[in-house]
Image: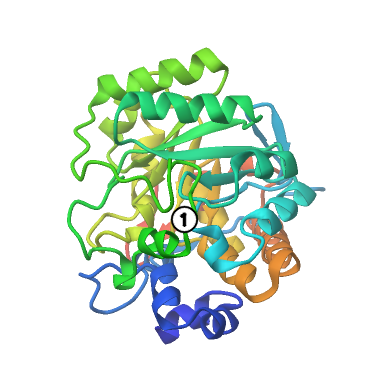
């Protein structure tokens, strides 16, 4: 457990005490090649600084966002994580209730133990995240499940959806083995544990198009997660996906993945579809930075897991409200009345000058 992680994550000390070393290190997610132990996505944010504008005469500040027909109170999405009931006896439900109270969306991993129908009944702005791996019939079945229980959409993870070799899980801890030991099935599995999938999925763009086509037939939009290359973003949009989640999957597989934050401007130039940033979000200034670089929304995960473990729904609500309040304040101090006014010119690369 690194001091840096404890310092940066709200409720981290309490979460570490409750979870123990192995599970906490798994949650932190350091890849085996990350010898320094620092979060590369957090470090990406620290390499940018905001350039505020003053005396702009703004009379109000609007941080709401429109997202597939829903109005969000802030540009935030609660992200997915596996094995929810390992971290809290009520699983994902406290986060679902906090998101419902604050009008924020929730993404649910197929490796979640709490049934999808139960979560969707608690919060209508729920999306199911699936691994782009295995037979297409498996994906179609899970898309049909999501449509049948009222999920709002699908997130397909296309970067590193399956561990190709044993022992590469963050912290050396296998959440799948732990779920199997407890006898708990997950949303995407047909038995206890996590559904075993081929280590090299072999998917290509035609498979993604087939998944998007099927989701579209059920009325569900698809966000493609794990895009880092702008050319891949352009191709993904051509397959019929409704938006892009720029993500290196928490740098959990390798610390050498480029941070999504550094790719936002290039990806934004390729599409006007919703662009969502994922990775390293801790403060309101991070949200404003991501939006200035081209994102429409930002995903938060690890701070919510720590809050869930430490204090349940109340702590989760506290983290989300704090982030919303910080985002409003920082954007206001930058001199804008709406988040739509943010541009790369509000950002300076440390030691590198203003962005165009």
The answer to which quarter of the image holds residue 157 is: top left
Is residue 313 placed above or below 223 in the rendered structure? Answer: below
Q: Is residue 178 left or right of residue 330?
A: left
Is residue 140 placed above or below 96 in the rendered structure? Answer: above
Of 38 and 204, the residue lying toward us: 204
Of 182 and 37, the residue lying toward us: 182
Q: Which image quadrant: the C terminus?
A: top left
Q: Residue at x 51, y 52 (%)?
A: 346
Q: Secondary structure at mark 1?
A: loop
The percent coordinates of residue 39 (x first, y second) are 37, 70
Residue designated by label 1:
82
The answer to which quarter of the image holds residue 315 is: bottom right
The percent coordinates of residue 99 (x first, y second) are 71, 50
Q: Which image quadrant: the N terminus?
A: bottom left
Of 114 and 5, the residue lying toward us: 114
Q: Residue at x 48, y 50 (%)?
A: 185
Q: Residue at x 55, y 67 (%)?
A: 87
**Residue 272 visible in the snapshot:** no
The percent coordinates of residue 111 (x first, y second) are 46, 49
The percent coordinates of residue 40 (x first, y second) are 34, 66
What scheme was used to colour the molecule? rainbow
**Residue 347 visible in the snapshot:** yes
Q: Is residue 108 left or right of residue 58?
A: left
Q: Residue at x 64, y 65 (%)?
A: 89
């Amino acid at each position: 457990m690194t001091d840096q992680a404890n310092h940066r994550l709200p409720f981290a000390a309490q979460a570490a005490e409750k979870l123990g070393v192995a599970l906490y290190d798994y949650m932190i997610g350091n890849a085996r090649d990350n010898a320094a132990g620092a979060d590369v996505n957090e470090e990406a944010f620290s390499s940018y600084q905001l350039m505020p504008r003053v005396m702009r005469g703004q009379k109000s500040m609007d941080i709401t966002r429109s997202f597939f027909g829903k109005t969000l109170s802030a540009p935030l999405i609660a992200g997915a994580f596996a094995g929810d009931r390992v971290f809290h006896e009520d699983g994902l439900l406290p986060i679902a209730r906090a998101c419902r109270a604050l009008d924020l969306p929730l993404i649910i991993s197929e490796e979640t133990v709490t049934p999808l129908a139960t979560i969707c009944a608690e919060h209508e702005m729920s999306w199911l995240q699936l691994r782009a791996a295995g037979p297409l019939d498996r994906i179609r079945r899970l898309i049909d499940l999501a449509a049948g229980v009222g999920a709002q959409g699908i997130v397909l993870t296309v970067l590193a959806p399956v561990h190709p070799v044993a022992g590469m899980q963050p912290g050396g801890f296998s959440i799948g083995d732990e779920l199997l030991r407890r006898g708990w099935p997950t949303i995407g599995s047909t038995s206890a544990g996590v559904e075993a999938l081929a280590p090299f999925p072999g998917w290509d763009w035609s498979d993604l198009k087939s998944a998007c086509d099927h989701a579209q037939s059920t009325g569900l939009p698809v966000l493609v997660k794990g895009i880092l290359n702008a050319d891949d973003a352009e191709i993904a949009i051509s397959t019929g996906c409704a938006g892009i989640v720029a993500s290196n999957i928490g740098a959990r597989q390798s610390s050498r993945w480029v941070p999504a934050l550094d790719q936002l401007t290039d990806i934004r130039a390729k599409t006007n579809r919703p662009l969502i940033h994922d990775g390293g979000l801790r403060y309101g200034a991070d949200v404003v930075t991501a939006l200035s670089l081209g994102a429409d929304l930002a995903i938060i995960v690890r701070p919510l897991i720590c809050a869930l473990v430490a204090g349940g729904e109340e702590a989760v609500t506290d983290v989300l409200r704090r982030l919303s309040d910080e985002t409003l304040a920082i954007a206001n101090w930058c001199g804008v009345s709406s988040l739509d006014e943010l541009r790369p010119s509000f950002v300076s690369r440390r030691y590198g000058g203003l962005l165009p």
